[in-house]
Amino acid sequence: MEKALSTELKQLLTKEQRIVIIGHKNPDGDAVGSTLGLHLFFEKLGLNSSVVLPNDFPDFLKWMPQADAVLNFEKQNQQAIRKLEEATLIFTLDFNSFARVGDVQSYLEKSEATFVMIDHHQQPDDYATVTYTDATIGSTCEMVFNVIEALDGLEHISADIATLLYTGIMTDTGSFRFPSTTARTHRVVASLLDCGANNAEIHQNVYDTNFTSRMKLLGVALDNLVVLEEYNTAYITISQKELDDNHFKKGDTEGFVNYALSVSGIKFALIFIENKQENIVKISLRSVGDFSVNEFSRAYYNGGGHNNAAGGRSLLSLDETVKQFISILPEYKEALS
Ligand code: 5GP
Ligand code: MN
């Protein structure tokens, strides 16, 4: 983090501020870890802050330290609104456009608070007074570590803060395997272990607590896998009925798209998940190499993300969405060859 930026940030961090820290809708490990990690760090500095997330996060993250401190905008609506309306300083973490926070969006738009963005997605919007953004860093949790370091706060990293930040770094780097994992990432992680993060326990808590129903749903997903060799592309579909039949819970489909990407030779992988309640098809896109799924998702799915991992949505039916996708692919034949 640049010195000028951290100096600016330091000046904003006064005891009078009513701070609210926000993560994106459908929070993942990085969103939960970074918001709670920063919140606990602020507590150490004697600053008053609250964490508001637009909706619930998956059960496999519920063990995270201080998970109960999160105000879920859907469930604790009045409390969350009060915090947002009273806020003088709002941190937006792990997202860079108000469109990513669901119903929290209108409260951010009308807020007169000062905004700070800490985020690693591409093409950030310009709403913050302090914008710390870097698309080369694998996770917002790594960036929060950088913020803590720049504020001379490393001594305040408790075992809980270390555990939160480790979790987000681990989930967003695919357990330290994506190209965004750098030597710096490993140094940060080493510091977090020194501060009390228990790596084996964290991996187990996140990855080895599946219910049978989730494994059955994975079976359905793999059965629905389609490989289009001509385009080095693979996709998975899951219908609402298949979700219902397998007692779908939030987070159950997390990581499924990676199975499509793991097929030998595949450069572009997607999962299309029907959501009848929201009347959309939620799409996760992944790639290896230069093919930008961020661009693809911006172009067709009203979404975005990173070069190799992005998300978006379609308003067509599941069948139509897939048909449309297949009709677009020939344009990308060269890019995918
Ligand atoms: P996932 O496919 O795991 O939901 O998301 C992959 C990446 O794309 C994450 O970094 C996530 O923040 C981002 N992403 C997911 N959905 C959307 C979306 O609808 N819009 C944008 N701009 N980014 C998204
Ligand atoms: Mn992230």
Image: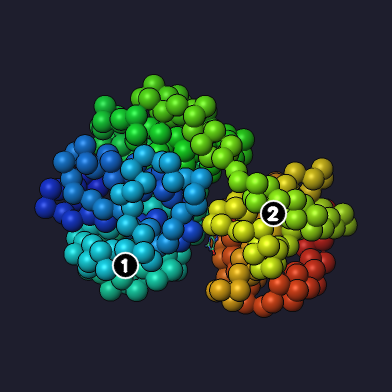
> Of label 1 and label 2, which has the lower sequence position?
1
Q: Amino acid at mark 2?
A: Leu
Q: Residue at x 60, y 59 (%)?
A: 248
Q: Measured from the top left, where is residue 196 in percent x and y? A: 38, 25
Q: Measured from the top left, where is residue 296 in percent x and y? A: 65, 63
Q: Is residue 259 left or right of residue 310?
A: right
Q: Residue 60 — which label?
A: none
To which residue does mark 1 refer?
77
Residue 90 position (above or below residue 43): below
Q: Is residue 18 left or right of residue 232?
A: left
To which residue does mark 2 refer?
217
Q: As rendered, which of 201 and 135 lies closer to the eye?
A: 201
Quadrant of ligand 1: it is bottom right
Q: Amino acid at mark 1?
A: Asn
Name the quadrant of the N terminus: top left
Q: Is residue 252 left or right of residue 94?
A: right
Q: Residue at x 65, y 51 (%)?
A: 213
Outermost top residue: 194
Outermost right residue: 230
Local SS, label 2: helix
Residue 133 position (above or below residue 3): below
